[in-house]
Image: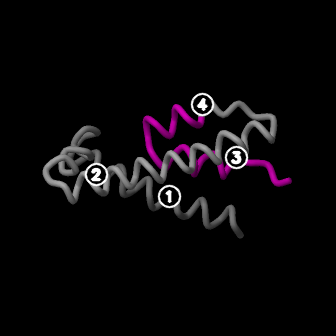
């Protein structure tokens, strides 16, 4: 059940991201965030949340004997896609 939910979230998020990148380009995703302090706050909040997720992901991957570096790089380049894909490929245990 959890895997199905993750796949659904990834599918919807992928479609939304594809539409946004199609319309605005990769850097355009960030352009509006730099226009005022409200946008900067949202960007800062996203950065903090992903930093917390990356801390957990790093520890979880190391404990499971997995290399966390690819997931960190993917997260830094593509945001939530990194943690979502990590969770989809995570072994139960």
Q: CA distance from mark 4 to mark 1?
A: 21 Å
- Number of the front mark, 3 or 4: 4
Q: How many residues crowd around disc 4 within 10 Å: few (fewer than 14), some, or many (20 or more)?
A: few
Mark linked to residue 89: 3
Q: Which of the two discs, 2 and 1, labels the residue nearer the N terminus? A: 1
Front residue of 86/16: it is 86
Query: What span is colored magenta in the figure?
Result: 71-93
User: In percent of the image, x 51 and y 45: which residue is there?
Assistant: 51
Task: Indicate the position of residue 28 as horizontal and vertical percent values.
Answer: 21, 43
> Which residue does the numbered mark 1 point to in the structure image?
11
Where is mark 4, residue-wise?
A: 70
Query: Could you tell me which secondary element the residue under label 1 belongs to?
Result: helix
Left or right side of 83 for 32: left
Vertical side of 5 occupied by 75: above or below: above
The residue that mark 2 highlights is 20
Choose the circle earlier in sequence order: 3 or 1: 1
Instruction: Give the dominant element type of the magenta stretch: helix, strand or loop.
Output: helix
Indicate the secondary structure of the residue bearing disc 3.
helix
Q: Residues within 10 Å of mark 2 (few under 14, many from 20)?
A: some
Whichever of labels 3 and 2 marks the residue nearer the N terminus, that label is 2
Where is residue 17? Give x, y as percent.
36, 51
Q: Are marks 2 and 4 in contact (CB under 8 Å)?
A: no
Furthest residue in direction bottom, as rendered: 1
Quick check: is 80 in the magenta stretch?
Answer: yes
6 w.r.t. 55: above or below = below
Q: Assign a secondary structure to mark 2.
A: helix
Above or below — where is 72 with respect to 92? above
């Amino acid at each position: 059940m959890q895997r199905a939910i993750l796949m659904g979230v990834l599918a919807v998020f992928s479609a939304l991201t594809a539409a946004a990148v199609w319309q605005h380009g990769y850097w355009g995703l960030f352009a509006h965030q730099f226009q005022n302090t409200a946008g900067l706050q949202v960007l800062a909040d996203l950065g903090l949340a992903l930093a917390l997720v990356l801390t957990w992901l790093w520890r979880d991957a190391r404990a499971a004997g997995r290399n966390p570096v690819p997931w960190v790089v993917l997260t830094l380049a593509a945001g939530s896609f990194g943690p979502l894909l990590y969770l989809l490929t995570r072994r139960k245990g």
